[in-house]
Image (spheres, grey):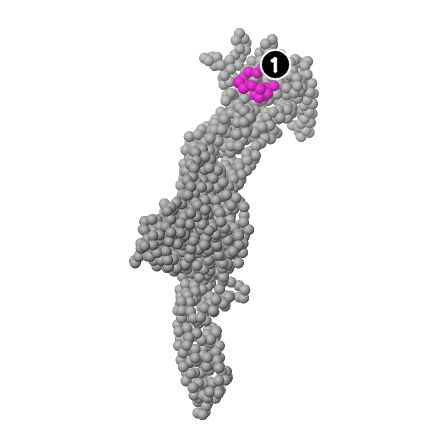
């Protein structure tokens, strides 16, 4: 064939195709196809198929818009979802086959928008099976054609016009009924065809003669209709009602009439349109419905474990290396300071010896000169007549500083000797003033050298320089203490006028008629206590049990809750709140409240950094801490953990000294100690008292409760407050005058008896005072009041009058009775009401104290919240690293929970794995809550002590929460590494991780509130009950509005909803009705995934706010 003929043939073919397309388009528009020969033409059939598909696509678009308002809760993107369900553009074989089967009558058999709406609305209106529809225009009691049967459809009358976009009127469709085309489904009760969605398999049914069912759709043929055969698919509903049209597991259906088995290395879930390649490490046999990705879970947990081990080991190694370097720097600085101090001592001894020699030589020479020459310099006479070794070096300055440049004649020997003496004195003076100028001499102190080498206005900044400065100062202070032990009058004046030594503000506390009464029982704890405690002195408070010693300290410190206080307490002569000075007041509790998982040095350093003034430089802070460690004898255990009940640490005596050191490092002006020597041996007690004595020499006002001190310890106190039972004062004054006072009452201390022991035995009534004094121990408080002229309480005035008559020689007839009048006994209801009232008042007082801030009068600027947050964060990080074993156990339990629930829970496509997610919410909530309780339960007492001293509670809370964020990030990964790879849901790992991340954040905040508000046992019980109860409430049917409101307040509902939504969104195509039905039944909305996460985060924030409020409000003192 020639090229010209070929071109003519192609042109004719193209023209014929254009004419055929235009003819088909006109036929479709008029809905009349009488030219059946063109339908059978293979060249024209694809074009007609495309035109029919375009009208079908327009129908689905209109349909999606029509029902969007009813299904918006389950359809996130209508266009995308409908495309995934009805976009058949990739393969139109089923449509071409149907066109050929219906002889071009397909558009008359397709359901209009009104009929499809009628079908889909039935899912919202009825709860029974979707197989039967309510009566309609074509299928009712009076009209029931073959097309009304399942799997069959009819056509409209040839003369009837059909608008597929009409959503209001169902057309009359009762003619030419026949079986439904493959790839379409014809519901029972309507006479039209609806295309099966992608992911379904809709072939023609075949009759099973044994069962009489049309398989695989399981519907029966109508009775008494022998010509009726099995048709096509009959329904499209949820997977529970119409699982037979879903593409089977292990196969994929690229079109609704093709079912292809899954090949090796691929997997095909139920309702798949294509096969998915398995991961490299997953094993996928032919016809596999899911891939086995357990290996990835094992790899993930192995990688996570390796990462955690690296983090923990690296952090621990960094801390260990840093501590070792600091220890080396500290030891080198201490060694250098000691060597420098010894060299300085040797130089001082040599200097003193030389001064003595020169003084003797000068005295010998001065006697050889005339009195006239000697009187020219009267200061030298003064030196010669001085007996003390303290000689002002300036007095030795030579009168003539010129040195001879030529040999002196013999006649000037005496003059030369005098000149030589003056030159020697000048050289010694220069060396003493500036030792660095003389070669071979280096006797300056370490801190002088360090500070000299520093640029002007710059402090030492390296660890070596700081430690050298600190230990040099300590050695200088030791030398100064040695000199102070033998001070002359001029030395005392010099020490008093030393302006270089930092001074602490002085606090003097005076109290008058101080009375504490317990509100609940109206019982006196203290009565009419009057006195004063002065700065620079150590006051010991003693007395028998029940004398109110601790109550007295609590009253001074402003911690007397649940009591009515009368009388006055003055601070420096002014009426002010003691809490206004809390930054410079140290209170040492009776119990050793220290952090057991920190070292001795870390405990002291944290207290120093948070409570010392910000104006104090770092070298001075190091000096303060090192001074306290050395004075308390804690050098050998400075790097040892304090220890807890479960883990052994330092000894009890050392722990007690650390307890005291926490208050000493903040350089207080008032130091109150509650039984600091209890449990200590004599040597440890004396070591502690010597450290406190040094604090007192700096002007610190020290008041402490002491039980049975030794005689040596007793003599180290300056003042004594002796209390009798009932909180009455027996003696308040100097320790040295106590025996004299009691001797005046006729109470003499026997030989070899410790005075404080004897006094307490008398006050207990164990020992009766000897002699003829006739003093009763119950009279001693009144005798003290009368002795000092203090007012006597009204109920004790009669006894006081009796004692006054006794002192005048008249014997009173009445005996002392502390209770002059018997109190009327209250009823049970009255006592109960009184207890409730006192408890409410006590809580009110605590809340008022914690919330109302007193004006700061301490004039000390401590670090702010942000700076303290950094200190707290460092401390919390170290504590968490030392709890690595506990953290590992938490992760292991979470890992096992994920493995167990993942293997036991079978993911249900109908509920989108809701059962597994329910167990996940319970397990993760329970385990994470119990673990988070430790954040605040273990060191609750330590925080109360720190907050009382002015340390920021906000910084403490934020640091704990920040450190716990590490667990918040890691724990979801640990759990999902097992659960996700065992269940393999359709939602992504990232979506599941985000949901669990928000869940863990939420339940961690709830655990904070439980740990702070409840005791540890009750908090653990609540942590177990809450996840179970709240999850049960969240999964119950919401029959009433009240239950719906309660469910909305449960975090479990939002976590479960977010997990189900994330998984349901991955079900599309044939799963669309299943998705809508399940979400409708559970009350979930596909658009609320972000809302659920936001509510979980909001609940976490609110619970943290509640926890912080409880932390600063409901403190148990």
Horizontal and vertical percent position of residue 794: 45, 46
Q: In front here: 1027 or 157? A: 1027
What span is colored magenta in the figure? 118-139
360 with respect to 193 (left or right): left
Note whether residue 625 is visible: yes
Under circle 1, the secondary element is loop
Is 319 drawn above or below residue 822 in the view shown?
below
Q: In front here: 1015 or 564? A: 564
Q: In front here: 821 or 22? A: 821
Q: Quadrant of the C terminus?
A: top left
Residue found farthest to the left: 752
Q: What secondary structure do most residues of the magenta stretch adopt?
A: loop
Note whether residue 309 is visible: no
How many tags in the picture?
1
Q: Quadrant of the N terminus?
A: top right
Task: Report the residue at 43% width, 74% height from top.
Answer: 390
Horizontal and vertical percent position of residue 452: 50, 68
Residue indicated by mark 1:
136
Task: Report the residue at 60% width, 22% height from top.
Answer: 96
Is 879 drawn above or below residue 139 in the view shown?
below
**Is residue 138 rendered magenta in the image?**
yes
Task: Report the residue at 48% width, 74% height from top.
Answer: 433
Horizontal and vertical percent position of residue 541: 40, 53
């Amino acid at each position: 064939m020639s090229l010209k003929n070929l071109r003519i043939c192609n042109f004719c073919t193209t023209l014929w195709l254009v004419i055929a397309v235009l003819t088909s388009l006109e036929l479709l528009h008029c809905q009349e196809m009488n030219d059946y020969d063109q339908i059978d033409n293979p060249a024209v059939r694809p074009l007609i198929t495309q035109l029919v598909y375009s009208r079908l696509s327009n129908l689905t678009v209109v349909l999606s818009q029509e029902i969007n308002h009813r299904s918006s809760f389950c359809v996130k993107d209508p266009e995308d979802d409908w495309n995934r369900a009805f976009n058949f553009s990739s393969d139109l074989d089923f449509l071409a086959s149907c066109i050929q089967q219906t002889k071009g009558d397909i558009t008359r058999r397709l359901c209009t928008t009104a009929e499809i709406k009628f079908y889909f609305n039935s899912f919202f209106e009825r709860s029974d099976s979707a197989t039967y529809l309510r009566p309609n225009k074509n299928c009712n009691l009076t009209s029931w054609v073959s097309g009304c049967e399942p799997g069959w459809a009819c056509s409209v009358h040839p003369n009837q016009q059909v608008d597929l976009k009409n959503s209001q009127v169902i057309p009359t469709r009762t003619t030419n009924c026949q079986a439904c085309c493959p790839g379409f489904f014809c519901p029972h009760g309507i006479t039209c065809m609806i295309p099966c969605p992608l992911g379904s398999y809709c072939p023609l049914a075949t009759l099973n003669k044994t069962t009489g069912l049309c398989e695989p759709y399981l519907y029966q043929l109508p009775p008494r209709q022998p010509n009726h055969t099995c048709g096509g698919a009959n329904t499209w509903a949820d997977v529970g009602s119409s699982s037979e049209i879903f593409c089977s597991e292990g196969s994929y259906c690229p079109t609704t009439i093709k079912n292809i088995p899954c090949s090796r290395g691929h997997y095909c879930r139920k309702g798949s349109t294509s096969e998915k390649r398995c991961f490299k490490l997953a094993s996928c046999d032919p016809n596999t419905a899911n891939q086995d990705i357990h290996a990835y879970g094992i790899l993930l947990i192995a990688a996570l474990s390796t990462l955690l081990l690296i983090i923990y080991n690296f952090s621990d190694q960094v801390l260990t290396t840093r501590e070792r370097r600091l220890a080396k720097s500290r030891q080198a600085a201490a060694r250098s300071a000691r060597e420098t101090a010894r060299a300085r001592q040797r130089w001082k001894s040599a200097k003193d010896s030389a001064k003595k020699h020169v003084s003797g030589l000068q005295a010998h020479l001065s006697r050889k000169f005339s009195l006239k020459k000697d009187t020219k310099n009267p200061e030298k006479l003064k030196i010669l007549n001085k007996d003390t070794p303290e000689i002002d070096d300036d007095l030795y300055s030579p009168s003539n500083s010129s040195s001879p440049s030529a040999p002196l004649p013999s006649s000037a020997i005496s003059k030369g000797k005098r000149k030589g003496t003056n030159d020697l004195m000048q050289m010694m003076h220069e060396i003493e003033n500036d030792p660095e100028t003389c070669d071979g001499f280096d006797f300056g102190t370490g801190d002088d050298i360090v500070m000299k080498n520093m640029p002007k206005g710059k402090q030492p900044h390296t660890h070596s320089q700081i430690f050298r400065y600190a230990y040099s100062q300590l050695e200088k202070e030791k030398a100064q203490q040695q000199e102070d032990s033998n001070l002359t009058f001029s030395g005392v004046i010099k020490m008093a006028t030393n302006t270089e030594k930092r001074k602490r503000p002085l606090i003097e506390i005076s109290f008058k008629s101080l009375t504490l009464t317990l509100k609940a029982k109206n019982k006196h704890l203290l009565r009419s206590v009057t006195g004063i405690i002065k700065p620079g002195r150590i006051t010991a408070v003693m007395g028998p049990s029940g004398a109110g010693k601790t109550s007295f300290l609590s009253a001074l410190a402003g911690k007397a809750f649940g009591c009515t206080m009368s009388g006055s307490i003055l601070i420096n002569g002014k009426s002010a709140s003691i809490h206004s000075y809390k930054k410079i007041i140290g209170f040492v509790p009776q119990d050793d409240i220290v952090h057991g998982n920190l070292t001795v040095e870390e405990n002291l350093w944290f207290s120093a950094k948070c409570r010392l003034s910000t104006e104090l430089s770092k070298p001075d802070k190091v000096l303060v801490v090192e001074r306290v460690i050395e004075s308390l004898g804690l050098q050998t255990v400075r790097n040892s953990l304090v220890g807890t009940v479960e883990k052994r640490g330092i000894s009890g005596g050392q722990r007690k000294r650390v307890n005291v050191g926490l208050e000493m490092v903040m350089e207080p002006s008032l130091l109150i100690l509650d039984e600091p020597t209890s449990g200590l041996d004599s040597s440890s007690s004396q070591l502690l008292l010597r450290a406190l004595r040094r604090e007192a020499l700096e002007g610190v006002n020290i008041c402490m409760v002491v039980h049975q001190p030794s005689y040596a310890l007793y003599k180290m106190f300056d003042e004594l407050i002796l209390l009798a039972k009932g909180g009455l004062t027996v003696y308040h004054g100097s320790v040295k005058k106590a025996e004299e006072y009691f001797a005046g009452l006729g109470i003499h201390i026997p030989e070899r008896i410790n005075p404080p022991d004897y006094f307490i035995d008398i006050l207990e009534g164990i020992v009766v005072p000897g002699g003829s004094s006739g003093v009763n121990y119950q009279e001693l408080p009144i005798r003290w009041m009368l002795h000092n002229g203090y007012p006597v309480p009204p109920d004790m005035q009669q006894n006081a009058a009796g004692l006054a008559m006794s002192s005048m020689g008249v014997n009173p007839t009445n005996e002392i009775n502390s209770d002059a009048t018997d109190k009327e006994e209250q009823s049970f209801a009255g006592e109960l009401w009184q207890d409730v009232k006192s408890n409410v008042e006590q809580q009110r007082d605590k809340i008022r104290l914690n919330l109302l801030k007193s004006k700061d009068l301490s004039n000390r600027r401590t670090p702010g919240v942000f700076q303290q947050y950094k200190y707290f964060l460092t401390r919390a990080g170290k504590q968490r690293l030392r709890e690595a074993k506990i953290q590992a156990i938490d992760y292991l339990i979470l890992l096992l929970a994920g493995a167990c629930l993942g293997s036991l829970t079978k993911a249900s496509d109908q509920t989108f794995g809701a059962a597994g997610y329910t167990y996940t919410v319970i397990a993760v909530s329970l385990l994470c809550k119990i673990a988070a309780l430790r954040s605040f339960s273990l060191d609750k007492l330590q925080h109360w002590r720190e907050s009382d001293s002015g340390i920021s509670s906000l910084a403490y809370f934020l640091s704990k929460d920040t450190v716990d964020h590490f667990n918040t990030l890691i724990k979801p990964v640990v759990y999902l590494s097992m659960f996700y790879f065992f269940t393999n849901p359709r939602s992504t790992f990232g979506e599941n991780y985000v949901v669990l991340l928000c869940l863990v954040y939420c339940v961690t905040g709830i655990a904070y509130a439980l740990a702070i508000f409840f005791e540890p046992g009750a908090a653990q019980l609540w942590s177990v009950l809450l996840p179970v109860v709240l999850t049960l409430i969240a999964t119950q049917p919401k029959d009433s509005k009240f239950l719906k409101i309660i469910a909305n307040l449960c975090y479990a509902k939002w976590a479960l909803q977010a997990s189900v939504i994330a998984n349901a969104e991955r079900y599309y195509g044939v799963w669309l009705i299943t998705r809508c039905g399940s979400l409708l039944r559970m009350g979930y909305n596909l658009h609320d995934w972000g809302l659920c996460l936001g509510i979980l985060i909001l609940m976490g924030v609110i619970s943290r706010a509640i926890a912080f409020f409880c932390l600063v409000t409901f403190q148990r003192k």
